[in-house]
Amino acid sequence: MKDKNIYDAIIVGTGPGGATVARELSRKNRKVLMLERGNRVPINGTMAQAIQNTGIPFKNVLITYDMLSMVRSTTTGGSTVYYYGTAFDPPFKMLNSYGIDITQEIEETRNEIPIAPLRDDLVGPMANRIMESAQDLGYDWKKLNKFVHQEKCRANCDLCNIGCPYGAKWTAREFVDDAEKFGAKVIPNAYVKKILFDGNKAIGVSYTKNMLSTKAYASKIIISAGGIGTPVILGKSGFKNVGKNFFFDPLIVALGEINDIYGGREFPMATGFHFEDDEYMMTDMTVPLPIYLGFTAEVFRFDRLPAHSRTLTIMIKEKDRLGGKLTSRGGVRKKLDPQDKKNLLHGYERAKIILKNAGAKHIYKSWYVAAHPGGTAKINDIVDTDLKTKHDSLYVCDCSVIPESFGLPPTFTLIGLGKRLAKHLNSKL
């Protein structure tokens, strides 16, 4: 086997977890191979490209029993290419209860990635109106920390929704690029089928590219294909209990029309508040016209279709209960718990009050959407506190390992877990 171990580490997936591990290992002169199912085409900020990477049914858009749509991205950098760059702190207390401390890694990250609230001139008029209304009602609603190179960011721009072409929004592609500069090899459009074993030890992966099947070998294998992709790969590799009792952060948006602002193009989730006791967060979420039309048409509010530039939008995202299962191909089989629906509707009633106080009329809500699937290969279930599986040399590092729903964007947490895992792997290698 010695001649076949051509890499120190193979990392499957280039989202924030996998890209962080690859970057940290490469900086220590480890020989790293990164395999990405999606493409590595430069981001151009077009809706056509966004649909290609996030809008393909049964690949990116997955429908649940409740007709709730869950969206994920398959491209280099994963969903960070299309997220809103919001840097919520990790759930330190929850992770500590499972024996995981990433405090040091998070502090390291603060010194490496720009993390700060947006400058005042980058916060749009709709986000400001919502924040002012919420503060007037007594909520501690304020600007949120963002992963943004603000010197590159532009006011009156909404392209962050469909992929920032200016390099303003930090994405995991930056860590992929760093890893490559330090010698890592990156192969896009590589669809990993299964993990290869020699007895109880993981020794490589089998993948296809351009319809050709290939095998690659390494001392350490790290699966970072996301909350849906990772359990599918593990399941095809012999794991029996993956993809069960997971979370997917359901959300709805509340919309209302005002007459004294003509906008509709701004950085979303610039401001907000975490209603922790009520198990949901709320933020502004002004979206581009095509996404707005989708929110509006799906609930048959065709009378609101022309009102995009005058519509205030508030997102309510809830910490859902664990449940459901994934199919062997990554299909989502989960229904919203009644308490989850109750929480979302409670948030909607609160959002209506904020919108009315802001002067909005014709208020309505969207249908349910979900994001951030996780908990499909949990710590203390599929992996241990080192993120190692029952097989030697096989690790997992993405949202699938997070054992409990915490209802907040997970990127900061995944970077911290990636740095922690890389330190462990470097000590072993």
Image: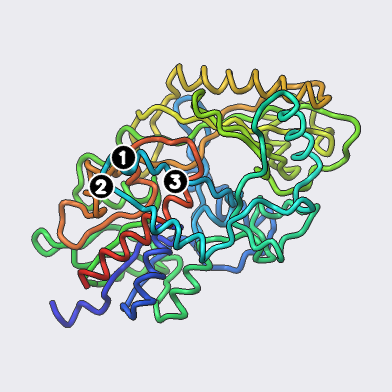
Query: Of marks 2 and 1, which one's residue comes earlier in the chain?
Result: 2
Residue to which mark 2 is pinned: 235
Q: Residues within 10 Å of mark 1 (few under 14, many from 20)?
A: many
Q: Amino acid at mark 1?
A: Gly
Residue 286 screen position, x and y as percent: 72, 40
State the residue at coordinates (50%, 73%). 177
Mark 1 → mark 3, Cα distance in angstroms: 23 Å
Question: CB under 8 Å between callouts 2 and 1?
Answer: yes
Mark 3 — residue?
A: 90
The residue drawn where x is 51% and y is 36% is 370
Q: Which mark is residue 243?
A: 1
Pair 2/1: label in front: 1
- The numbered mark, 1 or 3, whose residue comes first in the sequence reads 3
Left or right, 391 with respect to 13, comes to left
Distance from the alpha carbon under mark 2 to that under mark 1: 8 Å
Image quarter of the N terminus: bottom left
**Considering depth in this image, is 109 or 172 the residue closer to the camera?**
109
Label 2 vs label 3, nearer the camera: 3
Give SS at disc 1.
Answer: loop
Secondary structure at badge 3 equals loop
- The answer to which image quadrant residue 53 occupies is bottom right
Q: Position of residue 198 (x, y in %)?
A: 11, 64
- Which amino acid does the dot numbered 3 rest on? Pro
What is the C-alpha distance between the residues marked 2 and 3? Answer: 28 Å
Q: Is residue 142 above or below residue 151?
A: above
**Looking at the picture, which amino acid does disc 2 mark?**
Gly
Question: Can residue 294 be seen by looking at this rendering?
Answer: yes
* Placement of the C terminus among the 4 image quadrants: bottom left
2 or 3: tag closer to the N-terminus: 3
Circle 2 — which element? helix
Q: Residues within 10 Å of mark 2 (few under 14, many from 20)?
A: many
